[in-house]
Image: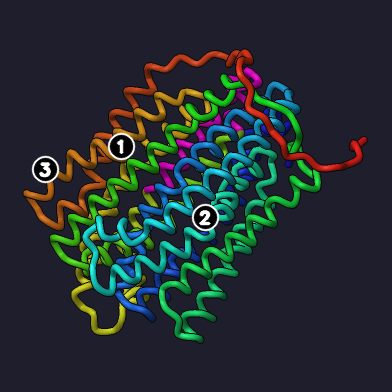
Amino acid sequence: MNEQEFASAPIGSLFVRCTVPAMVGMGFSSIYSITDGIFVGHFIGQEALAAVNLVMPIIMIITALADMMATGSSVRISILLGRDDHSEACRVFTVCLGLIASVSTVFGLAGFLLTRPLIGLMGADGLTADYAVEYLRMFSLFMPLCCIYYSTDNYLRVCGRVNLSMTINIFSSLLNIALDVLLIVVLHQGLWAAALASCLSMSLGAVWSLMPFIRRKLPLVFTRGTISLRQMQRILINGSSEFFVSIAGSLMAVVMNVVLLRLGGATAVAAIAIVEYVDSLMGMVIHSMVDALQPTVSYCFGAGLLQRMKRIQRTVMASSAVLSLLAMLFLLFGGRFLLPLFIKDGDAALYNMSLRAMQLFALSYLVSWIERTLSGYMTAVERPWHSLAISLLSTFLFPLMCMAILVPLWGLDGVWLLSFVAGVFGAIASILIVRRVRLETPVPPQPTMLFHSTISFNYRRRK
């Protein structure tokens, strides 16, 4: 599929061709994530599982700026391609990917040097703290390639190469599982080996995903040139929703982990980690469907096909609602059968706490799809402040407010119900915000100061 089909293919066919590969690829990523949690929890222990959950928010904060650049630039590139401005789209792609590599290198270095103080601030000690330090340091070393891996996935989808994106995701996930088996099960290594398996898999995936751009097989190619300061501002602003969501969500996760450590110790942190592993199977699949059609919505927006764009968005919302309902039913009635995979035999306390957490958390699927789809829609049509308002309210302000009320009332049950109660408020706020938006065909930005792209390759012009 090429990007011109975003504007011409039947919506039903376009939906299937874009979302199925993305959902399959993300499904394999979720299976890898779940398998990784199984290996860590079953073969290393609950302290290691708790350590991974403590470290993940820090990793998300480190990658937030790169994610902002990738999301904002992919939306801008899709709109430029919709206006048939391929040269400007290539310049935006080159500059932004270069900045992503640079920023992730700096943040990875900072994360490596400040690992011990960061873990200490979160209140972890003993074996859990030691595990967290070794896990974070390994990820910090590979941070540039990990950020490129996630960024190029956006650009492949912009070019309509959803099948290639799916193939790379499947390859990376299967390789990760194989390395987990070798390092953890066969060689009996610690948590650092789980981090190394993930990092090596994503690094090889990043190299593979870069090759089509380097070989000039896609509409986006590396080129020399500049982009205007206004263009860069628009990219950063449009990606600001993803940036602040990552920061806010990570900060909220840190707060939640601190509360859980005080209420239930490492067992409570391990319980929410297990729930999040199981949740990732459905949650990431739904998220991938929204992301997969974001370039299509942006392309139609840039081409002035507003009615087609709205029909696509309605299809996304209806499908998200159905998948979310299925996810809730799965967690309520089937999730319990997965719990023993993460828990060592005889650990009844962790099993019972995880089951209770999962049953209450499952209710959040009734409403979480509303915020997720509407925030993505606002990003796709370059309404970053609306997307940012939706995301900050749903991922930080409402959860923080609800935690202050629910935890004193219900203790751990208040933490497990947090996502559902905050999600109700988030859904209402999202609908009210989007209803106030009036969309018009975007106007091209005027150039001011310039950002330079210096990446180029010698090649013969294609005929």
Q: CA distance from mark 2 to mark 3?
A: 37 Å
Picture coordinates of residue 374, whole percent (x, y): 42, 32
Q: Counting other residues with Cα less than 10 Å from the Cα at mark 2, is it few (<14), some (14-19), or many (20 or more)?
A: many
Q: Residue at x 50, y 30 (%)?
A: 236
Among the 4 quarters of the image, the one containing residue 341:
bottom left
- Which of 404/355 is in front? 404
Q: CA distance from mark 1 to mark 2?
A: 28 Å
Q: Which residue is mark 1?
A: 394
- The first of marks 2 and 3 along the sequence is 2
Magenta span of residues:
296-324
Q: With respect to residue 297, does 366 lie above or below?
A: below
Q: Amino acid at mark 2?
A: Met
Q: Amino acid at mark 3?
A: Ile
Picture coordinates of residue 431, whole percent (x, y): 34, 27
Query: Label 2's element?
Result: helix
Please report contact status of discs 1 and 3: CB closer than 8 Å, yes or no.
no
- The first of marks 1 and 2 along the sequence is 2
Q: On the rendered structure, is 190 left or right of 216?
A: left
- Which of 230/262 is in front? 230
Query: Label 1's element?
Result: helix
